[in-house]
Amino acid sequence: MHERYFQNLDKVLKNSGICQPTLVIDKQRLDQNIDHLKSVVDRGFDYRIVAKSLPSIPMLRYIMERTGTRRLMSFHIPFLIQVAKEIPEADVLLGKPMPISAVNAFYQWYLSAQGAFDQQSQLQWLVDSVERLQEYEHFAKQHDLQLRINLEINVGLNRGGFENPQSFDQALGLLQDSAHLTLSGLMGYEAHITKIPGFLGGPAKAFRKAMARYQDFVRQISDRFGHDVVKDLCLNAGGSTTFPLYKEQGVVNELATASALVKPTDFDVYTLDHLEPAAFIATPILKDVSNPSLPMASGLSALLRKMGLSPKRGLFIYGGNWLASPCYPEKSQRADLLGHSSNQELYEVAANHPIQRDDFMFFRPTQSEALLLQFGELAVMDKGEIKEYWSVFRHPEQCHDAGANEAFNKHFNKTLNTKKTINPEDGIRS
């Protein structure tokens, strides 16, 4: 990346009055990345935004509008609740299987909220095993709920999910017989594909095997439910490193991705060479120090500098210790003299670099989902100006407040025609 880009960004931030560590989103780069994504989605796929990777309601709304989707993937009950409250038209697929206590927590909020979000038509719960499916069925039956169930299948990542035909058929039978659960689709996450080395067949072979495995599961559904049912299912796959591999619609009809749109360093992979980083941490330089030294060891420090083992110039920054790598100044790196610091971390920089105190140093996050939540609001740079700020997810009031618990218990006590109070652990035992 060109140093001129960051020197211009430094001016933009100073002109806007920013004076603390800030997560900056380059809106033009984000738009370009969205356009690349759309060129893949337009091959015949539906698109689902992975909300954990871009945890901001304004940002999600912006991408939903640009891509024409209302499909989101959620991984955290408090954030699911916030999406249901603030984007009530969203169609949500859980991205990981939740404990029954988390399911219970969501419905405690949902039944007291009386919002526009309709869980019966807009929410899919992810289930990875027969045992969890039985827990969900027991919970739904006990509380007279209708739940849509998406089954997680193992297509090669080996991170859990249904793996053999016997257990999968057992799950399908349970769904077929249940009056409270409905099969809504499958999820086959295949993030391993781009990491398979050549001696094991490489990414191309891994992709073919994953799709063949996916097809086997779909065939089982068709055999039990009929082909017409399969046509209406959400058959989800894809990820930020793999979505460009889908050249045409096959067994999969929906792709999920989000991190690629801002491209943290963990996504510097060959499949995303055409995308640009669009998220940066900017932080002011507090101190510019010549010949930084170890405490009480100036002589040793001088010797280490002569040996090239200690920096000749160091920058103490505002904050630090993030999951991020420095990208400006070029070739800067964390200095080991004082260890990590989240307050004033020390970075080594070339002695002749023009950067100075009060300028901004820039970092690229290694991943978006962990970093974006740390900075409160995202500064959105649009055509050389900071024009708006996008708030990030917060932990909303939910689950444990007295009003939600009271509404939850009132509803289910009426349903069960009993005065028993619902225990948050209720429904987890068969």
Image (tube, rainbow, N blue to C red):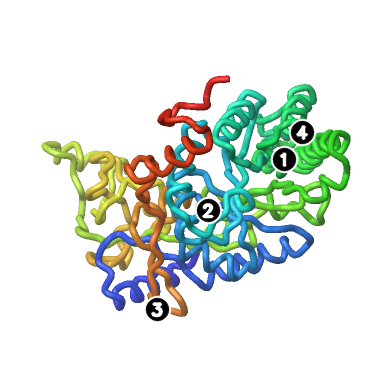
| Image location (x, y in percent) of residue 254 | 71, 53
| Numbered badge on residue 22 | none
Residue occupied by mark 4: 176
| Numbered badge on residue 51 | 2
Say whether residue 366 is visible.
no
Residue occupied by mark 3: 385
Label 2: how many Cα within 10 Å (few below 14, some 14–19, many 20+):
many
Residues at marks 2 and 4, CA–CA distance in whole angstroms: 31 Å
Task: Say which label, 1 or 3, has the lower sequence index.
Answer: 1
Amino acid type at circle 1 is Leu
| Image location (x, y in percent) of residue 427 | 52, 27
Q: Secondary structure at mark 4?
A: helix
Residue occupying image coordinates x 65% and y 43%: 148
Residue occupied by mark 1: 183
Amino acid type at circle 3 is Glu
Task: Say which label, 2 or 3, has the lower sequence index.
Answer: 2
Residues at marks 2 and 1, CA–CA distance in whole angstroms: 23 Å
